[in-house]
Amino acid sequence: MNTLLTSIPREGPLAQRGISLLIYSGWALTLLYFPSGVLLFYFGNAVYVRELLLAAHLIACLLWLHRTGDLRWVTRQSAILLLVPLFLLPAVADPDYRFEALRTVKWTFFWLDWIFIGYFAFQKRRWDQWLGIFIGLTAMELLLEALVGAYEWQAGRYVFSTPTTWNERTIFGVQNVKELTLMGKIRVRGLQRDVFSFANLMAMSSVLGLAVASLVRPFRQRVAGFVWAVFFAVMLVVSGGRSALLGIFATAVLAVAYTVDYRFTHKWSKLYLLAWVGIAVLISFTGVGTITDAVSGTFFGKSHIGDASSAYMRDDNWDNLQTALEQEPIILVTGAPIGALIDSRIAPMFHWADNQILWDIYHLGLAGALAIAFYFFRVMWVGRAIPQFRAMDVLILCLLFVLGEGVARESLTFMGCMPLFVACGYSTAASAASIATAPRSEPTKPRSGRRRRSKALGPT
């Protein structure tokens, strides 16, 4: 058995080639998911080949980790995320909610795949020209997305418009492309299915720029990072999808603080994150309409961007969800999918919760919701002692963004959470390496304990 686990060495040319193949193939697969709307528009249900490729990549990662002996550590750190499909399993059995539950379960596989990519990225000892190629391809794809959105904003029409004769539903029952307006103005969609996916991608791009600007040392690179971040933040605002603004604001404050005083900010960054956790929980249970109305009215006036009617609609969703929790408190213990097996009045899935915290509580119960939060806490706790570990700073920046957007959106089911899980995987690998190389203290000699016991008992 030991021979099987170590049949592929962790170092050497063979290991590095295998790691490179897994990283770049997973990266390429992620890029195939970015222009989701335009691919569905032109290729229809054929785009679900991506799901087969995702499954193949996951299997390849698991086999590689098994053969190198790393699978036990990685699964022990990430197994808690499997609570999501476990709790949703009863909803899959319900034909009315089956496809919605399966769509959510699919995101668990995304999370694991990105964790594996981050894990392998730490083990990559020497990067080649392919790193620059993939960074360039990613930047080009994100810029193209933003430019398409800018054109739609200026022209007042979509680049690809849904024909009335086109089948508007996928095989999973999801509307392929949504054309939404806000006070008579189109809500920019870019190459995505809807404005929310476009806004999430713009926000993710902005956060990546903030991460670069806050952690690199050359002045020009910092400026380039902030310019990138501002450009995509502007596209986020003009799109009309403002759910991610709170996350961008929380991330930007910390990023600027890093550039002013890195040591001080690094020391207190986790406390800053904890403060935002409290803010997110408070807003989730009190409402966001009044806050949005005040902020939007101050900065955007009476323009369509400043319209807060959708925020009050979100508050209504939260009220309905909290009412369900009050009327059926068993949901807090078992989660709604399992609770529906006990009480037929409980809906296994709550569509459009518009809040990640409330979504977790409704579907996973309090214990399950806390378990998902504990995953991120554990990743940071295990990696806390690694010296000069800037990936932890990136993890906190990405977690702030996902947490902030999660106040008004199920942020863990959008592509914008990808950098967070890659950072988690990288941190997990670094933690494993740190533990493996840490000096072990000598065990206490048993006879010293016996000597102390005999003295305490006195002469016999």
Image (tube, rainbow, N blue to C red):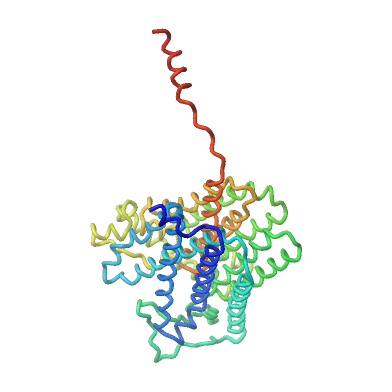
Task: Identify whether 223 is placed above or below 159.
Answer: above
Q: Quadrant of the C terminus?
A: top left
Location of residue 424 in the rendering, given as x and y in whole percent from the top left corner: 52, 57
Location of residue 242 in the rendering, given as x and y in whole percent from the top left corner: 55, 69
Query: Foreground: 5 or 364?
Result: 5
Give me the residue at 57% from left, 65% from top: 245
Query: Foreground: 451 or 105?
Result: 451
Query: Foreground: 201 or 164?
Result: 201
Location of residue 75 in the rendering, given as x and y in whole percent from the top left corner: 42, 55
- Describe residue 255's horizontal placement relative to residue 369 as left or right: right
Task: Identify whether 259 is placed above or below 24.
Answer: above
**Count of marks overlaid on the render:** 0
Furthest residue to the right?
A: 219
Is residue 355 in view from this perspective? no
Task: Identify whether 81 is placed above or below 133.
Answer: above
Task: Identify whether 368 is placed above or below 45.
Answer: above
Give me the residue at 61% from left, 55% from top: 393
- Describe residue 330's horizontal placement relative to residue 243 as left or right: left
Q: Image quadrant of residue 258?
A: bottom right
Furthest residue to the top?
A: 459
Give me the residue at 46% from left, 57% from top: 68
- Describe residue 349's horizontal placement relative to residue 269 as left or right: left
Query: Foreground: 390 or 364?
Result: 390
- Describe residue 8's horizontal placement relative to residue 238 as left or right: left
Location of residue 431 in the rendering, given as x and y in whole percent from the top left corner: 54, 50
Give me the residue at 30% from left, 65% from top: 91
Is residue 51 in view from this perspective? yes
